[in-house]
Image (cartoon, helix red, strand yellow):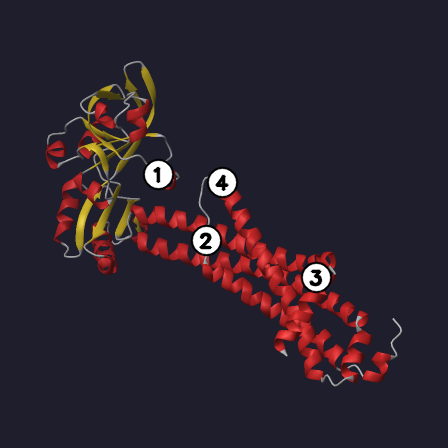
């Protein structure tokens, strides 16, 4: 009986193709809205999360707002290695400087730090070496530049061609000792300038008036992700004591907490957009109920004949309910196909890859079935409860 009801439902849908398509249009739009919006948000958030994760999830970033007239020195930071949960520590100083090589001049972001920074950030080099302890101790004017600086400022077709060359930062010569790997598009969103150079912190102190003699910013990494909270407590207590028990004198940012916050934001946005798309599906469900009521009215004599030859209420109910479900599922299938095409187009023009997850497709299918069931049950019950004699005498 089920197979026969499906055949009859399909025949009824195909007999009025345009009307059926317009009926399914609400479901199609709702499914497209659900899949495309959620997929784009998840894809974009995933790229940002990956970029933040690449910066490190087991590190703390500290900003000193008020050193109480007693500047924190690099040596004091090195003393933090006594904490058992600390893996690496590195001061960070930043400035903007004119960068010059031969006749080419531009602006670059200059970062002053120590060898621990490259280990914390897991910095990958295309060639050369990173800053090391002797560079810091001897205040050497050496620099690790990014790939774009080597290619554009130094006109190096190969990153190795930049090694050993001298660039001028604020008029002071620095020898290039390393070139970082080319940044991917996700990491570039965190860069404020195209060109950058990393030099020893002690060299930046002499180069920049804004850095001065004290450390205003530094990062630390934990020996493992599960020890990050313990390290946060240790560093927080040390800073509290060092800065006269003034918690307002510094800020401490836990990168793991940022990741957790981003996950919560993503889930909230996904739920919000899913709710908006669900409204479109509800509108589509109203369209299905409307057309099914019309169909019941048009086929009143058919219902009367089927009841006269022995069809029960259950059989009539099943026939119209299956027709409503098929309308909903066909609309869902067309919506999934349209969503795939739209995501491909968005990916082509944006340069990013967006994919439909099985969970989203399952959610769209399940919700479409639910809509078909809820909005199909009333017309089906109305058809099943028609009296045979009244249906046979219907003159519409």
Asked if residue 55 shows in the view, the reply is yes
Give me the C-alpha separation between circle 4 and circle 1.
18 Å
Give me the C-alpha separation between circle 3 and circle 1.
51 Å
Q: Is residue 163 left or right of residue 283?
A: left
Q: Is mark 2 on a helix, strand or loop?
A: helix
- Above or below residue 362? Residue 173 is above
Which residue does the numbered mark 1 point to in the structure image? 184
- In contact (CB < 8 Å): disc 2 and disc 3: no
Q: Which residue lies furthest to the top in this view?
A: 103
Give me the C-alpha separation between circle 3 and circle 4.
35 Å
Q: Quadrant of residue 188?
A: top left
Q: Nearer the viewer, mark 4 or mark 2?
A: 4
- Callout 1 crowding tier (Cα within 10 Å): few <14, some 14–19, many ≥20: few
Residue found at x 27% / y 28%: 209
Q: In which quarter of the image is residue 115?
A: top left
- In contact (CB < 8 Å): disc 3 and disc 4: no
Asked if residue 71 shows in the view, the reply is no
Q: Could you tell me which quadrant the N terminus lies in?
A: bottom right
Identify the disc placed on residue 348: 4
Give me the C-alpha separation between circle 2 and circle 3.
37 Å
Nearest to N terminus: mark 4 or mark 1: 1
Q: Is residue 167 left or right of residue 308?
A: left
| Foreground of the two, 173 or 95 | 173
| Foreground of the two, 74 or 89 | 89
Residue 145 picture location, percent across and down: 26, 30
Residue found at x 57% / y 61%: 275
Which residue does the numbered mark 2 point to in the structure image? 42
Residue found at x 40% / y 57%: 263
Give me the C-alpha separation between circle 4 and circle 2.
17 Å
């Amino acid at each position: 009986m089920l197979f026969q009801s499906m055949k009859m439902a399909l025949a009824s849908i195909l007999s009025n193709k345009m009307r059926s398509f317009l009926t399914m249009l609400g479901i199609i739009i709702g499914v497209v809205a659900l899949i495309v919006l959620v997929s784009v948000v998840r894809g974009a958030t995933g790229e940002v999360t990956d970029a933040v994760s690449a910066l490190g999830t087991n590190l703390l970033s500290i900003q000193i707002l008020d050193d109480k007239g007693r500047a924190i020195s690099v040596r004091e930071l090195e003393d933090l290695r006594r904490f058992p949960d600390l893996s690496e520590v590195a001061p960070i100083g930043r400035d903007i400087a004119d960068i010059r090589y031969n006749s080419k001049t531009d602006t670059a972001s200059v970062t002053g730090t120590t060898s621990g920074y490259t280990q914390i950030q897991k910095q990958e080099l295309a060639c050369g070496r990173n800053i090391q302890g002797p560079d810091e101790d001897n205040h050497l004017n050496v620099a690790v530049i990014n790939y774009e600086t080597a290619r554009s400022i130094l006109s190096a077709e190969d990153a190795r061609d930049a090694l050993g060359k001298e660039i001028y930062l604020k008029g002071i010569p620095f020898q290039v000792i390393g070139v970082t790997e080319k940044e991917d598009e996700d990491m570039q969103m965190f860069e404020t300038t195209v060109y950058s150079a990393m030099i020893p912190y002690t060299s930046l102190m002499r180069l920049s008036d804004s850095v001065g003699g004290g450390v205003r910013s530094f990062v630390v990494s934990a020996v493992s992700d599960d020890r990050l909270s313990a390290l946060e407590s240790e560093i927080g207590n040390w800073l509290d004591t060092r800065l006269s028990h003034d918690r307002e004198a510094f800020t401490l940012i836990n990168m793991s907490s940022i990741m957790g916050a981003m996950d919560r934001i993503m889930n909230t946005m996904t739920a919000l957009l899913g709710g908006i798309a669900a409204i479109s599906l509800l509108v589509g469900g109203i369209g299905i109920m409307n057309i099914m009521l019309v169909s019941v009215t048009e086929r009143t004599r058919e219902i009367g004949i089927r009841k006269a030859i022995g069809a029960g209420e259950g059989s009539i109910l099943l026939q119209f309910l299956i027709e409503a479900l098929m309308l909903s599922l066909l609309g869902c299938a067309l919506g999934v196909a349209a969503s795939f095409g739209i995501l491909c187009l968005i990916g082509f023009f944006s340069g990013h890859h967006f994919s439909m997850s099985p969970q989203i497709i399952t959610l769209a299918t399940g919700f479409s079935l639910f809509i078909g069931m809820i909005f199909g049950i009333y017309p089906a019950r109305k058809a099943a409860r028609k009296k045979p004699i009244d249906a046979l005498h219907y003159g519409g």
